[in-house]
Amino acid sequence: MPCNKRSRLSVFPVFILALLLLAGPGPARALEKELIYPVPHLTPTENRGLLKVGDPAPDFTLTAIDGQPVKLSSYRGKKIVVLSFVPAAFTPVCSSQWPMYNMARALFQKYNAEVIGISTDNLPSLYAWTRGMGQLWFPVLSDFWPHGRVCKLYGVLRHNGTAERALFVIDRQGIIRWSDIHDINQRPPLDDLDQALAEVAATPVWVKPEAGKR
Amino acid sequence: MKIFPVPKKTAGRLVAGMLLLLLSACLATTPDWQRTSLPPLVIPAPTRAADRQYLGLAPETTSFTLDQIKGRLVVLEFILAQCPHCQHEAPKMKQFYELVQERGFSDRIKFVSIALGNTPLETGLFRDRYQVPFPLIPNPGKYVTKVEATPTLYFLQPESGGGARVLYEAVGRLPDAEKLLQQAIELGGLSSS
């Protein structure tokens, strides 16, 4: 690159400096934002709720990103389970929901609860995406094949093969005690989940309300 | 760096031309989101007595502006409790605060962090998880101010009226604690006495 012409050499360092300043150290966030797929506003929910409070949670086994199978009923008698279905890896709201649960581990420990993350993405996608969340303390499962099988069981499969943004709280008897099929465009408030967990922890066994009472 | 003998006129013109190019390049690449000043911000007061004391706020304060903080330079941070970057940088911010204490600047450099859109529950979890030693204030309602990304860190010189001059801004990944302290001392014109 340096020219042989003597008259140019004196401005060479200045030229390089200009190039360096033009290149610049871009803000770190720019690289992250490039990995997030822009999503337009979506229909808040497509499904009403197949399962009701008091229903047994359908059992399933899915593979986690560490390659190990996770079976829901293995938590029976041991932990309250929070199933967190999210629509898609590498999309905006999803990218903040699990990091919140990751940060809030103490809250789940307080209730002796496990979080299980599920989406219909394949394992490599889930793996790559969750690398940006730091070390997750809870398992992340892929419902990719048969596509959306578990989402269907829970009534949270959308028409385009993604899951609803849905939460289920399952007690130690395997009974659904709370669910929230949330507006897909919004992060479900942690305070609501905290309240639900507090109620389940306070009444460990579900009691069917008397007929006529809500 | 050898300067080869060239006709003075040519060299002079070339250098001037390059400097002009350099200047315009710098101006062209200044991101829109970088601010040189902040408008008056109304910040909810921290609920813990120790935090109010640290900032020099009266016990009955419900909200405050930056010029009410007793200090010469304010380190103002905006985070989201659910943002992985903020979680990653939290230990660094703690180190920075501790360095300020150790080096005797705690009366002159004051820290405030605001968790945009987060409830007291979410903010408290973040504070406990990362042992945040300075006031971390939940801002569940209307954002105190909008930021382009988090964490956003400002070094500010508050002005009467509630606004502030921005001495320094960092977004995303932050420089290490030692560098941050040096910047604060330099830009804030703070001597080590």
Image (cartoon, coloured by chain):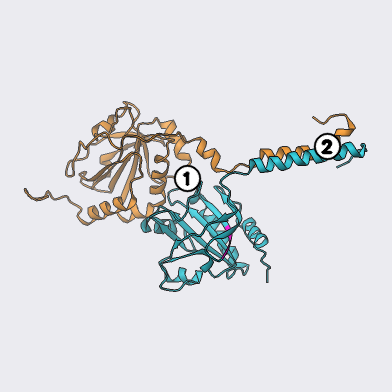
Chain colours: A orange, B cyan
Q: What residue is drawn where x is 23% and y is 52%?
A: A200
- In the image, is residue A59 above or below residue B98? above
Q: Amino acid at mark 2?
A: Leu
Q: Which residue is disc 2 drawn over?
A: B14
Camera-nearest residue between A210 and B41: B41
Q: Chain of mark 1?
A: A
Q: Return the x and y of residue A6 as percentages of the image width and height.
A: 89, 32
Given residues B102 and A24, the one toward you in this image is A24
Give coordinates of residue B6: x percent, y percent. 92, 37
Which residue is situated farthest in the front direction here? B161
* Amino acid carrying mark 1 in the image: Gly
Q: Residue at x 49, y 35 (%)?
A: A35
Residue B157 included in the magenta stretch of the image: yes
Query: Relative to A93, is B78 on the left or the right?
Result: right
Residue A125 position within the rendered picture, expressed as x and y whole percent measured from the top left: 44, 32
Is B126 left or right of A181, judged from the image as shown?
A: right
State the residue at coordinates (68%, 43%): B26
Chain letter for mark 2, please. Answer: B
Query: Residue A148: horizontal and vertical position, in percent?
Result: 30, 29
Query: Can residue B81 be found in the magenta stretch?
Result: no
Label 2 to label 1, Cα distance in Å?
Answer: 50 Å
Task: Assess disc 2: are there few (<14), some (14-19) or many (≥20) residues with their C-alpha within 10 Å of its C-alpha.
Answer: some
Q: Residue furthest left?
A: A211
**Principal secondary structure, stretch drawn in magenta:** strand
Task: Tell whether B124 sits left or right of B31.
Answer: left
Q: Residues within 10 Å of mark 1 (few under 14, many from 20)?
A: some
Residue A134, disc = 1
Position of the N terminus of chain A, as image quadrant, is top right
* Magenta segment: B155-159
Badge 1 element: loop
